Image: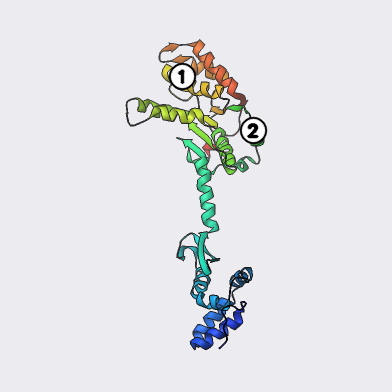
C-alpha cells in the first residue's frame, strides 16, 4: 500500500484512501465527501497546501467536521455562544479557533461607546440621540446645531488645542439636552469620551454626600472637573446656596478654565439672567460680586448661543 504521509495534499485521493482502509459505510462516506467539498474548508486547504498532507487531513477529519457543523448552527446554539469557528494550522495539527462573531463585535463596540458617554443623572434619551435627529432643523435651531457640528469637526482635527464650548439657552423642551446627547454620541463614535452632568441632580447628590461617609464627594467632583469634554445640563435649575456656588460650581469652572478644558452649558436662562436672577441670590443673601466672578469663568469657557423652536415634550 502506498505511503501518503509525505505526499502533497490531494483531497480526492485522501478520501479514497480513507474509505478503502476503514471500509466506510455509505452514510459516513457521504458525510466525509460533503465536508471535504466545503468551500471554506477548501480555501483553508489552498492556504496551507505546502504544510498539509493527506494523512493529516484524514487524521484531523473530526476537527474539520466540527468546523463544518458549527458554522452552520445559529449563533445562539453554537458551542461558544457569540463566537464563530475559524480553521487554523498550529503545530502540525488542524485546529478550530473561535473568534467573536460580527454581532458580538458590534455589541462590544456599542458597550465601549456607551462607556465613553459618562452620564450623571441624565435622561435615557441621550443614549439614542444622534445628530441625524436634527437633520431638518428649524431656522431657530440651525445656528446652534451648526456651531455644535463645527465644534466636533474642529476638536477632531486638533484635539490638543483648546476649543471653547457653548452656553446654549432657550425655553424648556426645545432640544438642548437632546443636542448635547447627540454631540456626546458623535464623539463616542470616534473614541472621544464626554461627560454629561444634570447639574441640579448632581448638586443633590453632593449635598447628600456631606453626611454620608460612604460617599466620596471629592472623587465625584474631580471626575467632573477633569473631564476632557464636559456638559453641565440645566444649570440655573438647582436650588442655589453659597456653598454650591462658591465651593462646587466655582471650583469646577476654575479648574477647567486654568486647564483649558472644553465645557458646555444648557440653561433656561441667558447668561445675564443667570447672573442677575440666579447666581447673585442665595439663601445667604445677595452677593453680586461673587456671581460676576463666576460668570467670568462661564464666559471664558463658552460662547452664548440661543436655541428656540417647538416644545417637543408636549407631543
Report the disc number at residue 115: none
In the displayed structure image, the side of residue 207 where residue 197 appears, left or right? right
- Which residue is at a point 57% across and 81% down the rendered structure image? 4
In the displayed structure image, the side of residue 120 where residue 296 appears, left or right? right
In the displayed structure image, the side of residue 113 where residue 218 appears, left or right? left
Image coordinates for residue 22, horizontal then vertical, percent: 49, 86
Q: How would you rate the neighbour count of disc 1 (Cα within 10 Å): few for under 14, some for 14-19, many for 20 or more?
A: some
Q: Quadrant of residue 307?
A: top right
Instruction: Report which residue position mark 1 lands on.
Output: 245
Image coordinates for residue 140, horizontal then vertical, percent: 65, 31
Mark 1 vs mark 2: which is more N-terminal? 2
Above or below, 7 relative to 256? below
In the displayed structure image, the side of residue 145 where residue 88 appears, left or right? left
Query: Which image quadrant: the N terminus?
Result: bottom right
Report the disc number at residue 151: 2
- Which residue is at a point 53% across and 59% down the rendered structure image? 101
Judged from the image, the secondary structure of the residue bearing numbered disc 2 is: helix
Front residue of 163 and 23: 23
Amino acid at each position: 500500500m502506498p505511503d501518503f504521509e509525505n505526499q502533497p495534499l490531494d483531497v480526492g485521493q485522501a478520501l479514497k484512501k480513507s474509505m478503502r482502509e476503514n471500509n466506510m459505510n455509505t452514510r459516513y462516506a457521504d458525510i466525509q465527501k460533503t465536508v471535504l467539498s466545503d468551500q471554506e474548508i477548501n480555501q483553508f486547504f489552498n492556504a496551507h497546501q505546502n504544510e498539509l498532507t493527506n494523512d493529516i487531513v484524514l487524521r484531523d477529519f473530526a476537527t474539520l467536521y466540527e468546523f463544518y457543523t458549527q458554522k452552520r448552527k445559529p449563533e445562539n446554539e453554537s458551542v461558544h455562544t457569540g463566537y464563530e469557528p475559524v480553521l487554523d494550522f498550529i503545530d502540525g495539527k488542524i485546529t478550530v479557533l473561535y473568534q467573536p462573531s460580527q454581532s458580538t463585535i458590534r455589541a462590544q463596540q456599542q458597550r465601549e461607546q456607551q462607556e465613553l458617554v459618562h452620564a450623571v443623572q441624565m435622561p435615557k434619551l441621550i443614549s439614542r440621540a444622534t445628530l441625524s435627529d436634527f437633520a431638518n432643523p428649524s431656522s431657530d435651531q440651525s445656528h446652534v446645531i451648526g456651531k455644535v457640528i463645527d465644534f466636533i469637526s474642529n476638536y477632531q482635527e486638533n484635539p490638543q488645542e483648546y476649543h471653547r464650548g457653548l452656553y446654549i439657552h432657550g425655553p424648556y423642551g426645545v432640544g438642548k439636552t437632546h443636542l448635547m446627547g447627540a454631540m456626546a454620541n458623535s464623539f463616542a463614535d470616534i473614541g472621544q469620551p464626554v461627560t454629561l452632568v444634570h447639574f441640579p441632580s448632581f448638586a443633590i447628590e453632593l449635598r447628600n454626600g456631606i453626611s454620608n461617609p460612604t460617599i466620596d464627594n471629592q472623587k465625584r467632583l474631580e471626575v467632573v472637573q477633569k473631564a476632557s469634554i464636559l456638559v453641565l445640563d440645566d444649570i440655573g435649575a438647582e436650588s442655589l446656596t453659597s456653598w454650591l456656588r462658591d465651593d462646587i460650581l466655582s471650583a469646577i469652572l476654575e479648574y477647567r478654565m486654568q486647564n483649558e478644558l472644553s465645557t458646555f452649558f444648557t440653561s433656561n436662562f441667558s447668561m445675564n439672567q443667570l447672573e442677575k436672577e440666579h447666581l447673585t441670590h442665595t439663601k445667604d443673601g445677595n452677593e453680586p460680586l461673587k456671581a460676576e466672578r463666576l460668570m467670568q469663568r462661564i464666559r471664558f469657557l463658552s460662547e452664548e448661543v440661543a436655541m428656540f423652536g417647538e416644545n417637543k415634550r408636549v407631543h
